[in-house]
Amino acid sequence: MFRLFRIFNSRHLRRRPLETFLVLLGIALGVAVMVGIDLANQNAIRSFRESVETVSGRATHQVVGGPAGVPDSVAAWLMRQTGIEAAPILEYLALCREAGDQPVRVLAIDPLADTFFRDLAPLQEDEEMTTSFSASSGSPLNSSPNAKQVERAVQTLIKLMTIPGHALITESFAGKLGVDESDSLNLLISSEWKKVVIAGMIPARVDDRLSDENLLVVDIATGQELLNRPGFVDRVDLIGDEATMEKLRQLLPPPLKISRPERRSEYVDSMLRSFRLNLTALSLLAVFVGMFLIYNTMMFSVLQRHKQIGILRCLGVTRRQVVGDLFLEATLLGVCGAALGLILGYFLSRYTTPTVGTTIRDLYVHIQIAGVQVDSRIMLKGFLLGLIATWIAALVPALEAARVAPAVAVRRSSLEIRASRFAPRFAILGFTFLLATVVLAFVPGGVLYGFAAALVLALAAVLLTPLFTIGMSRILSSPIQQRAGTPGLLATRGIRGALSRTSVAIAALMISLSMVLGMQIMINSFRASIETWVGSILRADLYVSPLGGATARWQAALPDDFLKMIASQPEVAALNTYRASEFEYNGRLIYLVSIRGEVLMERTDFIFKQGSDRDNWQALRRGKVFVSESFAQRFAITAEDSLELSTRHGRRFFHVAAVFVDYSLDQGQVMMDHATYAASWGPARINSAGIFLKPETNVQDFLNRVRAASAKTFAVQINSNRELRQQILEVFDRTFAITHVLQVLATIVAFIGIVSAILSLLIERTREFGTLRAIGMSWAQMRRMIFLESGLMGGLASLLAMPTGFALALVLVHVINVRSFGWSIALRTHPMEYAQIAAIALAAALLAALYPMWRLQKISVAAALREE
Amino acid sequence: MIRIENLHKSFGQAESAIIALRSVNLDIAAGEFVALYGASGSGKSTLLNLLCGIDSPTAGQIIIDGKDLAALTDDEATLFRRNTVGFVFQFFNLLPTLTVLENVILPAQLNGLSRRDAEARGRHLLAQLGLDDRWQAMPDTLSGGQQQRVAICRALMNDPSLILADEPTGNLDSETGLHILSILKDLSCQKQKTVIMATHSHHAARFADRLFQMCDGELFEMPRPTAFPDVTKSG
């Protein structure tokens, strides 16, 4: 078989370098998109996971609490227990003035207890330092060089533990900033700048990622003061066996519980799952479109070699050898294309990774992606998928080659006759798939049914393409001929005459355009829904939040003094304060949100799914809660249901008053009045506030005054209503930036498919074109014919893409988005969206004809007539 | 009608050049039926291609009805082919996506003739060649002889003064081939068309008024003997 391949196939591939290259490029782009997205997703999750694991150190378990955290008393009690090691932790991501816009992790620890968990001591040899410190009790040690080092380290630790505002800094971070011991750093904590003094360095350690971080370590007491968390820590890390942990679980007061350190990563993983799944599904589209390109090229290749295959069969080559030979060819193309795709995918990931990182930071959690790390599993998966896609696409051409009888004279039209005959059968199958799409869309279940519905819809459209092509080319033949004469007639007939190839090229372009249209309708509808939602809830004149929220998110709080200052201004009619905190519910991360019900009731227009606004707000003020749509969808909750939440008084039931539309937190939120929140978890630390001014107030003047007044004391961000709406829409647009890139890439693959198909068709019909030139067709007429044919292919693709794209938008909006994120979106469509698709299709098809046209012009008429 | 002076055609360059025609000189009057007889590779098709204007000579001149073909622009050559020449190919070269009638009227439609007028003339031509009942058929449903007759109708559509036929019976059985040859003969005798036919069949060559043998690119006029070497049997 290899000998046959060497003689027969490899020469064919070498003699058709452009067509071979186009196939390779099609496979490569499909693989590149998939690998680029997978690497971006993987790097984002890896960055977060590494950062969690790095800080967790050797902890086997953690005690975590509700929104307030873990009280000092519980931490102290845990540290006294035998059979376990315990260390309290406060953790915060601050902005450091000296580090520009780089965030710095602030870890507040108990230096003695922490040695079992992390290597943060200011000395390489921990045991020596710890032993010396324990033994010294303040006595000076002997004067050997090593002992001097130990003594210095001990003094550093004493300074850290006894003098407020001192911190250890990693050597690597200090090097970046150019600072040394006794230098001070300014940290933005929530909305205040606070100073810390460097007490010592944490040396770099091999295989210890923590020592490479931008890290400041402070004593727990300093941390509580810096972070304004008196009496609480974020968590208590534990080392112990499961049996001991089980006993502790029974003794912990509510809402505290013991979990594993990796739980945080799992929460975030779950949070990002829908986002990543949607990106992955989009990336698979490029592979799907690429398969059409491979099919078309291989089918053309088989048809070109029909006679040669017939001769080989005469000489004794079996059908199995022919099929095996074709698959070997496909394998070579698949391997080379996929390998090229891996390289391109890596380079693509250098764009997609920071883009995905930005979106995750905008919408979910703060992550810092250091760079793109190549994951061999992702590369292998991409490679295999590219190869498998090539094999699937080569299957029909290989079977076609196997049908070639041992004969020299072969009717080339037999394939086209079969294609025309099968067109109605494909159409029936297509309609069946359409019904299946509807069934899948309505089957209750996860988002995978939605993706299945989208895939089946795409297949339905592909199966309908041949009959659609035949029908439309017949309908359009007469009007086109009337306008364009003989070139028009030949163009429409040319499409029908090579149906097995033209319908595939049309289908590939159609699928790509449908995806572009469907996504565009979804994005535009989503944007319009968000604008409506923003208009209903953002009614305050000004919005204020701590600057530190950029990195610390919900940990950053507005100081009480600032809120009092604002509330005391005579221009202020009302002030809404807002608090969000992460909370575990039924094993998943949600948000508890508290607000001032009496303010929002009068001044906003929440979109509720049921009940009257007034009744709903009254219920909230009486202690009931609202849940967002995504929460309701995720946990199958409706109004009148009850939620059981863990509070500091134990588990309590909260009755749901209403479900409301929300696009801000796709994990889901439970919203309640501040009074309800405080009764269950203690007073809320406020994350942001909305300021409602009296009608006669000049908003800009007030804004300028507040900015000036707070500039020196508070680091806050104050935005006007318009500014905040603009920011929200900018985040929205950024979120879909990567989607647009994927759409463009999938369209490029389809464009390559059209170029390849038109090139193949023109080459196949070289003798036909030679005949036309010989009997008197001018070049101008020939150009018109070719452009009409390719333009018609583009036009047909766009015509079929329009209803398909709209149907896809329906699936995206009403199934996939709802099941992924729980959002309901009002579908809206605009004629410009369809016009855009038609323009893209026509431009692609006409551009695709340029090179084949140029190539044809270079062949003399005499040479064309000699073509087989 | 046709004057060929010192025509030379070669393919390739320098030492590897293949000389297809060497110093060919030829005068053909209007209405003559001329056969170019010779084995494969003797230069017959090359000469026809040059006469049609779809290829250009390396040296020499071709004057047809006073026009020097080499001086024509591409568009002028195209119009020349459309209106002055009718080409009949060995493999018929009918367009598979067009019906018989659509194939026939193609040259007229390229000239801008209305579809109604073109169809009327096309059907007239088909009727003359006994194919009127197949005007809606697709080419691949016709026999070889029928296809060649359709190709002849197409070649006659714009009433050209010159018919070029390249091995018109090469793909046909002998009986059908004779029928085609008699049609070409009629065109020459009764319609005063100049017919130049390339062939390697001595039977076909007998239909011509004048016979030229081509050998290694050179052209020799021969008398019209009843018997002469059958080059199909030569090496």
Image: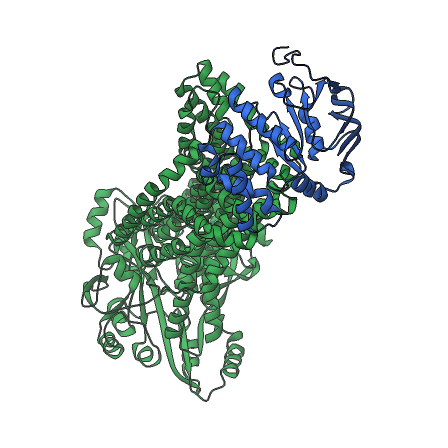
Chain colours: A green, B blue
Residue A493 visible, this angle:
yes
Q: Is residue A246 left or right of residue A534?
A: left
Q: Furthest-front residue in view?
A: B190
Look at the picture and state if A708 lies above or below A70: below
For residue B178, above or below residue A734: above
Pick the residue in front: A7 or A361.
A7
Frontmost residue, A357 versus A417? A417
Q: Residue at x 68, y 31 (%)?
A: B49
**Residue A384 falls in image quadrant:** top left
- Write the residue at 27% across / 77% down: A613
Residue A229 vs A388, above or below: the answer is: below
Q: Residue A426: horizontal and vertical position, in percent?
A: 34, 42
Of the pair B16 and A388, the residue shown nearer to us: B16
| Number of disc labels | 0
Q: Position of residue B63 (x, y in %)?
A: 78, 35
Position of residue B113 in the picture relative to residue A363 (left or right): right
> To which quarter of the image does residue A708 belong?
bottom right
The answer to whether residue A161 of the structure is visible from this angle is no
x, y percent for residue B15:
77, 19
For residue B33, above or below residue A583: above
Q: Nearer the viewer, residue B211 or A468?
A: B211
Which residue is pictured at 25% across the width and 46% down the height? A82
Across and down, in percent, residue B13 comes to 76, 24
- Of the 4 image quadrants, the one containing the C terminus of chain A is top right
